[in-house]
Image: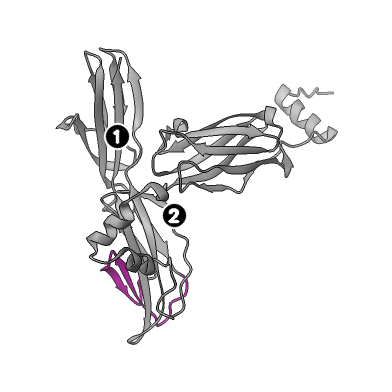
Amino acid sequence: MAKTRMTTAALAVCLALCCGAPARAEVTLDPDEAVFNGADEAVTLRVLADGQPVPAADITGFRLLAGGSDYRHMLRMEPGMGVVTLRPSPTAEVGSYSLAVETRGGTAWAQVYTPLSRHQTSLQALADRLHITLDELKREIGMTRDFGTPRITVEMPPVHYAGHAFRLALTGGGDVRRVWKVNGETVSEGPEAAALDHVFAEPGSYVVSCAEYQGDRRVAGFSELLEVVAEPPVLVEVAPKTILNLTGPDGFRQYSWEVDGAKAHAGQKLSQTFDAPGAHTVTATGTDPAEGNPKAFRRITYAITIK
């Protein structure tokens, strides 16, 4: 009779199936989004494994990610029984991040926005730029109700990165004509304009609005404020005369670099050495994306400390 030999891996699978070994619990955060409008705010998220609270001792750490870089220095996390409490650190910057809370049973994810709007003066600056009062601007962006026509409900991110493709789609349509505006200027219109595809090239506050018309009669619309910011810098510390190998963003056909404001190598990768202690800024800009909005670009700033 022929003998059958079972591998260790196959045996483990067999034992798990035959003996009813429990599956790995799904670790989640509730809610899965945190928004900080002030540097003094705190947000508490529940940490659950298959719906049950995760003990504080099993919460081992966190990462705060944007564009592949870790910005955990911008956030403070305090674990508790089945919860984590988050607070911005003194180094927090306006931005949009993915939060990974690490536990012994797995990783839970949430989105973190830090518009820090209570500490921004950009709203008044935008009103000045548009030659309207702050009250008129607040009325325009829906801080007070307007027009007496039905208001379209949209979900706008509190923060968006300059250069990244921005898309906001509306449902329905039919014979409705839509007019999309950014800071009062029409950027797209027509029956086929069911979505806004736009690239905000510069940081700042923008009023994004859309009005729907049937003939010449406005039937619905919305206006919302969007805060556009630069990506936070990647912090790098190295010793003098260390060869730094830096990489520009993926997904682009063209690259440009600047070292302390001076143009440098044009490929995706840059090798740079600094001989003496000090602070330097290196930026990599990717343009001509391989796919998506052709106007999109991405700029990575490396804040380098030599010591």
Q: Could you tell me which secondary element the residue under label 2 belongs to?
A: loop
* Residue span colored magenta: 171-193
Say which quarter of the image contains residue 247: top left
The answer to if 174 sits in the magenta stretch is yes
Question: In the rendering, at what x and y percent does residue 144 appear?
Answer: 43, 69
Residue shown at 46% from the left, 72% from the top:
152
Q: Which residue is found at the position 36% from the left and 27% from the top?
A: 235
- Name which of mark 1 and mark 2 comes first in the sequence: 2
| Residue to which mark 2 is pinned | 157
* 74, above or below 171, in the image: above
Q: On the picture, is 173 further left or further right than 261? A: right
The residue to which callout 1 is attached is 301
- Left or right: where 203 falls relative to 19: left
Image position, residue 271 (x, y; %): 25, 22
Indicate the colouring scheme. one colour
Q: Please state which amino acid type lies under the numbered disc 1.
A: Thr
